[in-house]
Image (cartoon, rainbow, N blue to C red):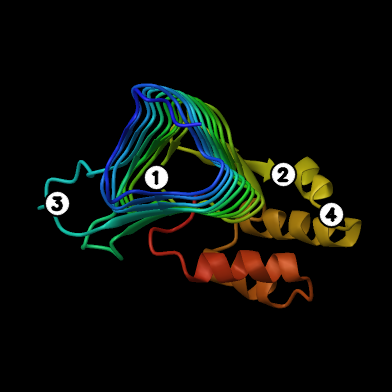
Amino acid sequence: MIDPQAFIHPTAVIGKNVSIGPWSYIGSDVVIGDDCIIESHVVVKGPSTIGSGNHFFQFSSIGEQCQDKKYAGEHTQLIMGDNNVVREGVTIHRGTIQDQGITRIGSNNLLMANAHVAHDCVIGDNCILANSVNLAGHVWVDDFAIIGGMTGVHQFVKIGAHCFVGATSYVNQDVPPYIICSGQPCAPRGINIEGLKRRGYEKPEIMAIRRAFKTLYKQNLPLKEALIQLSESEFTGVTVMADFINQSDRGIIR
């Protein structure tokens, strides 16, 4: 059902079984997939492509121009997958030509009230951004990561898969996969064991990841030497961790 008080631009493409509440605004060059729910007072601007089954709560602002002072009206995009829940007051900005021109959000994510996703961010699948999380530009958040409330993430930081970042943290360097971290600045605390168990990781794999954590953080080894030891592991999870660290531009929390 589309409320008669909603505004939908003539160029917007609205899928099947979409609900749009009163006083919501759907701008030009917006594509809304099937079965989406857009509550009242939601703004969606384009170019934006929204998948199916997403639910946007009131006062969220989706696909707005970014706050980067270098942005000069270039054609950039927001691309969002399926079955995301975007709560009250969330802001998601489009990309910039200084990157790939796309802010990209995967599927099955929960963005809690007042979270902010800045330009050129990439969020994977099954992530949770708790209340008032702020992602600066060009941040990557991999699958199944959870970021606690009121956490700030510095631009260009990458947060690995299955990480858990504690509330009110300040993340200014990359966080390797599987790690629990918190603090200002953010520091490693351990491995997200419960999260890995819930996602089907077997005990030998979890134990190998725990040993890798000790190698990285408990043995006072230079990073290069720790990476050599990680590269000798036969476990996929440890290989994923080592690859992430080798590809880090900002350096990892340590």
Name the spot of residue 86 as percent of width and height, x first: 50, 34
User: Is 188 or 239 nearer to us in this picture?
Assistant: 239
Specify which label sits upstream in the sequence, 4 or 3. 3
Q: In this view, does 43 lie to the left or right of 219?
A: left
> Rounded to the nearest whole Å, what is the CA distance between mark 4 and mark 2?
13 Å
> Rounded to the nearest whole Å, what is the CA distance between mark 4 and mark 3?
43 Å
Specify which label sits upstream in the sequence, 1 or 2. 1
Q: Which three-letter amino acid code belongs to the residue tagged 1?
A: Asn
Q: Which three-letter amino acid code belongs to the residue tagged 2?
A: Asn
Q: Residues within 10 Å of mark 1 (few under 14, many from 20)?
A: many
Q: Do the residues labelled 1 and 4 touch (CB within 8 Å)?
A: no
Q: What element carries label 1?
A: loop
> Rounded to the nearest whole Å, what is the CA distance between mark 3 and mark 2?
38 Å
Please determine whether, in this image, residue 85 is positioned above or below residue 123. above
> Rounded to the nearest whole Å, what is the CA distance between mark 1 and mark 3?
24 Å
The label nearer to you, 1 versus 3, is 3
**Disc number for residue 200:** 4
**Disc number for residue 71:** 3
Residue 158 seen in the figure: no
What residue is shown at x 12% (from left), y 52% (from top)?
A: 73
Q: In this view, does 82 lie to the left or right of 61?
A: right
What residue is shown at x 37% (from left), y 25% (from top)?
A: 4
Q: Which three-letter amino acid code belongs to the residue tagged 3?
A: Tyr
Q: Do the residues labelled 3 and 2 touch (CB within 8 Å)?
A: no
**Disc number for residue 172:** 1
What residue is shown at x 84% (from left), y 54% (from top)?
A: 200
Residue 67 seen in the figure: yes
Q: Which three-letter amino acid code belongs to the residue tagged 4?
A: Gly
User: Is 62 or 20 nearer to us in this picture?
Assistant: 20
